[in-house]
Amino acid sequence: MQELLGRIARLDPNSSLGLRVIACFDELIVGNVNTRALLAAAASLAGCTAGFRESGSQAAMRVSPRGEIDRSQAPTPRDDLLARAGDDMLVWLERDEAPFANDAIILERLALAVRIRHGRGQREIDNRRHLGVLTERNSSVEERLDAAGALGVVAARRYRIVAAPLFAVWEGRPSGPKDVIGTRFGPIHVVVVPEIFEPFRAAPGGIGIAASVHGLDRSFRSALVALRLCDRAREPMVVADDYGGLIDLLADADDDVQHGDADSLTLVAQQHPWALETVEALVTTQTVREAARELNIHHSTLQARCDTLRTGLGFDPLQGFGRTRLGTAFLMHRLSRSTVLDLPAPAAMTGVSRPAVVQEDWRG
């Protein structure tokens, strides 16, 4: 872990801090430290006072970044710097300015640690193992049911997996079971939400297909594909359903396997600068005329482009299964060149607000 943190710190101090938050609170939970120590850790990581209060009580515990008890009058916690630690406890951070990039993950881990410390969330210690079981392809039926029961996920209902990198910017973070899971793309923040969920936004973020407890591994794989298809300007968050069954198919594809149509599209794109935007218009509209309007070009110009695509791809992209082949090739091409999970450009460790993260140039 320390070696990993060191490598990431050299690439991006901000993301390194996100990992340090997770590692820090994991150690504090295992050490069974008291509430004051948990608040002191949060305050030190955030660089501002952290507070805790039980619902219905006027008394609040507040700790400064120096680890000192702050006995001044507690301000009313701001909604964007507040987290619930169960139904009857609140934790918060106190800032005058906009939330910093890692405030959300600090609050999330502080809330989890406080729940466990007060005996109201002991089962969440095993969230990593339980979520790992639900998102693992080879888990048995019995293992899935046990993990679902431990997380409060009902076997008779359908859920979705939400996937986001640790540097994602959240608005309205969902409240379902969550943790960070290791993948071949690096650590991914994973949340389980109902099939029909309350609005939220993660930029970048991918939302998987709806599935029962026994299919949440497929929802997880489709969420990863959706995440890798994100586009900063147009699609900061992708829902797998928007691409029909194609994402579900791509979720089971091996990234290392050669895909002839995608390779052909890459060659065509290298020869013709208009190729990719033309293909995107063709696969996202119903007719050639509609695609021409989308591209703001004449119908005859688009027809000429289609003839060029037909020659380069070796099949007619407008007839029969040709449209499906074109759509699949286009998505495979995007996946092979996705940079959405690359660490953002280096930024200062402190004083980085959420908008600064949004403006980083990541693209899928």
Image: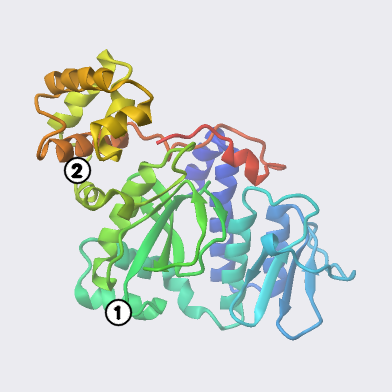
- Indicate whether 222 appears above or below 136: above
- Indicate whether 129 appears above or below 96: below
Residue 357, position as x, y percentages in the image: 59, 40
Residue in front for this viewpoint, 273 or 139: 273
Residue in front for this viewpoint, 282 or 241: 282
- Secondary structure at numbered mark 2: loop
Q: Amino acid at mark 2?
A: Asp
Q: Which residue is mark 2?
A: 254
The reply to whether residue 41 is visible in this rendering is no
In space, the residues marked 1 and 2 are separated at their CA atoms by 29 Å
Using the image, tell me which numbered label, if any, was put on residue 155: 1
Its colouring scheme is rainbow
State which quadrant residue 271 falls in: top left
Evaluate if marks 1 and 2 touch, with contact meaning CB atoms under 8 Å apart: no
Q: Amino acid at mark 1?
A: Ala
Residue in front for this viewpoint, 358 or 112: 358
Residue 24, position as x, y percentages in the image: 58, 58
Q: Residues within 10 Å of mark 2 (few under 14, many from 20)?
A: few
Mark 1 or mark 2: whose residue is earlier in sequence:
1
Q: Is residue 97 toward the left or the right of residue 106 in the image? A: right
